[in-house]
Image (cartoon, rainbow, N blue to C red):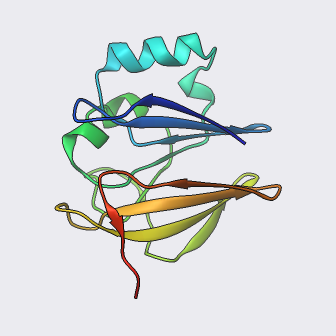
Amino acid sequence: MKAALLESGSKGNCCLIKHKGTKIVIDCGGTKRYLQQCLQTLQCDVSDADALLVTHTHKDHVAQLNSFRHLPAYAWADLGREQQQVEPFETFWIKDIQVQVLPLSHDAEHTIGFVLEADGEKLVYITDTGYVRN
């Protein structure tokens, strides 16, 4: 599994995860131009991606929702568009990557992180927040 952090910080957050034939975008903040340049550098066409995972609805995480409207979106928070509603601790698959939803503490409602697992490799994506244990 490979991860490319396209942007991280108050200006925007976006990460691309690739494993075999699966491509997942996590968050889509930042400018459209910058994200397109990053994806071009990685020789990745976003139209080939399989899904968009969204951690929360602050602008630096969702500014480019419209640019990724063709992707199935997964979020706990309401994105104001068609989406797959996920819940904390839920586990689901996007092709060959298993995704587990983690509840997080942040000043945005319904903030989550993700644990992605494939072929024995794990990647944890947590941003702006701390993990909440029940």
Name the residue rendered at 64%, 14% in the picture.
43
Image height of 15 relative to 47, above or below: below
Q: Is residue 69 visible?
A: no
Q: Residue at x 53, y 75 (%)?
A: 90
Res 77 → quadrant: bottom left
Say left or right for 29 vs 50: left
Q: Looking at the picture, tell me which residue is in the foreground, 9 or 23.
A: 9
Query: Where is residue 100 shown, x and y percent of the image?
Result: 57, 67
Percent across and percent down for residue 72 are 50, 47
Residue 54, percent across and down? 39, 51
Taking 37 as reference, is 110 left or right?
left
Compared to residue 34, the image places residue 2 above or below, namely below
Looking at the rendering, in which quadrant would you find the N terminus?
A: top right
Residue sitting farthest toward the bottom: 134
Task: Measuring from the top left, give residue 75's x and y in whole percent.
Answer: 40, 59
Q: Residue at horizontal 34%, vertical 13%?
A: 33
Vertical placement of residue 36 versus 48, above or below? above
